Image: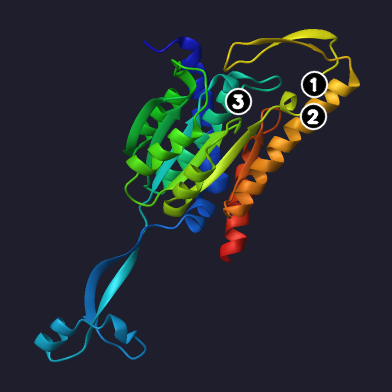
Amino acid sequence: MIPRELLRQLRSIEIHTRRLADEQLAGTYHSVFKGQGLSFREVRAYVPGDDVRFIDWNVSARMDAPFVKVFVEEREMTVMLVVDLSASEQWGTVRASKARVAAEVGALCAFSAIKNNDNVGLVLATEVIEKLVPPKKGEKHVMRVIREIMGFEPQYTGTNLRLALQTLVRVAKRQSVAFLISDFFADGFERALALAAAKHDVIPVMLVDPRDEELPDVGVASFEDLETGEDILVDTSDPRVRKHYAESMKAIRDQREKLFRKLALDRAVVRTDQSFIKPIRDLFAKRARRLGR
C-alpha cells in the first residue's frame, strides 16, 4: 500500500511535469536526442539525384532497372535515469530536498521520453545498487519510475558513483541517453564516468542546496555527516570557518565542472531553492544550438 502523502506528491509531480514536457520540451527533446541510426523501410525505383551508394544491386538485377534502398531514422531510444539516493540527497533547506528535486527532474525527462515513444530505465544507487528498473515504455511504467525515486527507502547511506556508472554500462546494452542525477559528493568515479561517456550520452545533473555553498552564522552547532553518522561541533560564528567551508565547497564544484568539460559532457545545475525546469530547458536549448537545430 502506497502512503497517502506519497500518492499526493506523485500526483502533483505527474501533473506538473507532464504539462511541462508537453508544452515546453517535447519538440526540443525530439530534435536534440537522436535515435540509433537508420533502419531499412523499402526499395523503390531509382530517380536522378538518388545516392548511388543506396542502390540495391540484387533487386536492380532482377528488375532489369535500378532500384534504391529507402531508410528512415530509427527514432526509438533508451533513456536511463541514474539517481544517487545516498543520505545527502535527503538534505534540502528551502523548497525541497535533493531527492524530491531528483524525482522532479527524472519525471520531466521520463515524460519527455515516453512522448517520443522511447524507453525509460532506472538505476537507484547509494554505496550499493539499491534498485534496478529495466527500460520499458508507457505512462504506467514512468509512474513506477517516479514512485521508486520518491518513495524508495535506501538500505545504505553512502555514495558510490563508480558502481552506479559501471552498472549503467553493464545493463544498457545499446547506446542510451543517461541522466546522472546527484550532488556529486563522491570520489573515485572519474574513470568510470569516462568509460560510460564513451558508450552512452551521459548528462550529469548536479543538485545544489544553498547550504552546500555557505554556512549560516548560528553560533556553535553540531553537524551530522548524513552518510557516516559522525557528529562534528563547528563554531559557525567564526568568519574563518565560514570562509573555509565556502572555499572548500567551491573547490569541489569547480573540480567536477573541470571533469565534465574535459569529457565534453553537457550538464545542468539544478538548485533546491529554485525551479528545476529552467536548467533542463536551457540544457536542451544549448544542445539544439550546438547541433544547429
Q: Choose top left, top right, bottom left or bottom right for residue 280.
A: top right
Label at residue 140:
none
- State the separation of the CA atoms marked 3 and 1: 18 Å
Residue that appears at 61% across and 30% down: 185
Residue that appears at 90% across and 21% down: 239
- State the separation of the CA atoms marked 1 and 2: 7 Å
Label 1–label 2 contact, CB within 8 A? yes
Residue that appears at 55% across and 30% down: 102
**For this view, does 268 lie left or right of residue 19?**
right
In front: label 3 or label 2: 2
Label at residue 98:
3
| Camera sees residue 206 | yes
- Regarding mark 1 in the picture, which secondary structure is present there? loop
Crowd around label 1: few <14 · some 14–19 · many ≥20 (10 Å): some
Residue that sits furthest to the left in the current view: 62
Return the x and y of residue 76 as percentages of the image width and height: 35, 52
Residue that label 1 marks: 215
Amino acid on which disc 3 is placed: Lys
Up the image or down, 82 lies above or below 46; here it is above
- Quarter the C terminus occupies: bottom right
Name the colour scheme: rainbow
- Regarding mark 3 in the picture, which secondary structure is present there? helix
- Quarter the N terminus occupies: top left
| Camera sees residue 293 | no
Residue that appears at 56% across and 40% down: 20
Q: Which of 69/271 is in front? A: 271
Q: Which of 102/175 is in front? A: 175
Return the x and y of residue 59 as percentages of the image width and height: 14, 82
Amino acid on which disc 1 is placed: Leu
Residue that label 2 marks: 246
In primary-sequence order, the first of circles 3 and 2 is 3
Return the x and y of residue 263 as percentages of the image width and height: 57, 53
